[in-house]
Image (cartoon, helix red, strand yellow):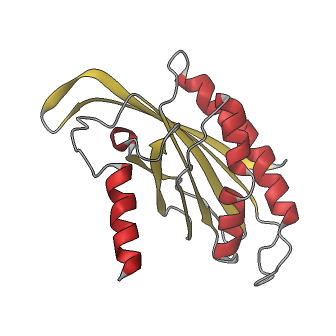
Amino acid sequence: MDLRQVYLFDQEVRSEGGRKLATPARRIAAAAVFKNPYAGRGAIDDHAELAELSLQVGEHLTQRALQALHPLTPDAFGKATVVGTSGDLEQGLVAIHVRLGLAMRRGIKGGPALIPGNAKIGAPGCSIDIVFGGLDSEWDLDAMDCMPITIPDAPRHDEILLAVAFLAGKRPNARIKGASREAVAKLVEDLQRV
């Protein structure tokens, strides 16, 4: 694993919307920049090398992020990637969806819910939003949040920027009430009958 850079983003939200939070929300993201083994090769079908690399990088990033979050424990997680312009969007999706979640779940010793992921092609300095979802349920609306990150000189055209993130607490001032899982299931069932 040959990483050009590793970044740690640590954000503690103490006040939001003019309201001081009783308990600050803490967002931690760890990001790495490394060579894309498939840069400049166009669309390919075998991404095994990148899937394995993302697992290794993900284990390192998860450990760094959880160490920074300690002694707090995460309530939500997310992942994101930016592929340099000599890459392919599918390479970014392989990096975040095939094996990265395994590293994150091992690190927190759980997290059965779907881990939100975001991927895009970009030039150095572009931002990416890491979307958070609850560890135990994708229906945990209070855990849905977002953290933008930017690395000024990454990714270069032949690199990948890969990030994992954890949220301790809930989204600042979380107060929406969405439809229940049951209500959504009923609506979908009704729509499928039409």
In the image, residue 73 lies at what x, y percent?
52, 23
Left or right: where 3 falls relative to 88: right
Which quarter of the rendering shows the C terminus? bottom left
As drawn, the residue found furthest toward the front would be: 193
Q: Nearer the viewer, residue 104 or 17?
A: 104
Asked which quadrant contains residue 158, the reply is bottom right
Left or right: where 61 falls relative to 189: right
175 over 74 or under it: above or below: below
Q: Residue at x 67, y 72 (%)?
A: 157
As drawn, the residue found furthest toward the left would be: 18
Q: Nearer the viewer, residue 180 or 106?
A: 180
In the image, residue 59 lies at what x, y percent?
74, 39
In the image, residue 126 lies at what x, y percent?
49, 64
Asked which quadrant contains residue 189, the reply is bottom left
Q: Nearer the viewer, residue 131 or 126?
A: 131
Q: Residue at x 64, y 32 (%)?
A: 110
Q: Residue at x 65, y 66 (%)?
A: 93
Q: Nearer the viewer, residue 32 or 103?
A: 103
Q: Residue at x 64, y 74 (%)?
A: 89
As drawn, the residue found furthest toward the top would be: 71
In the image, residue 23 lies at what x, y percent?
30, 20
Left or right: where 18 falls relative to 97: left
128 over 12 or under it: above or below: below
Q: What number of labels is visible?
A: 0
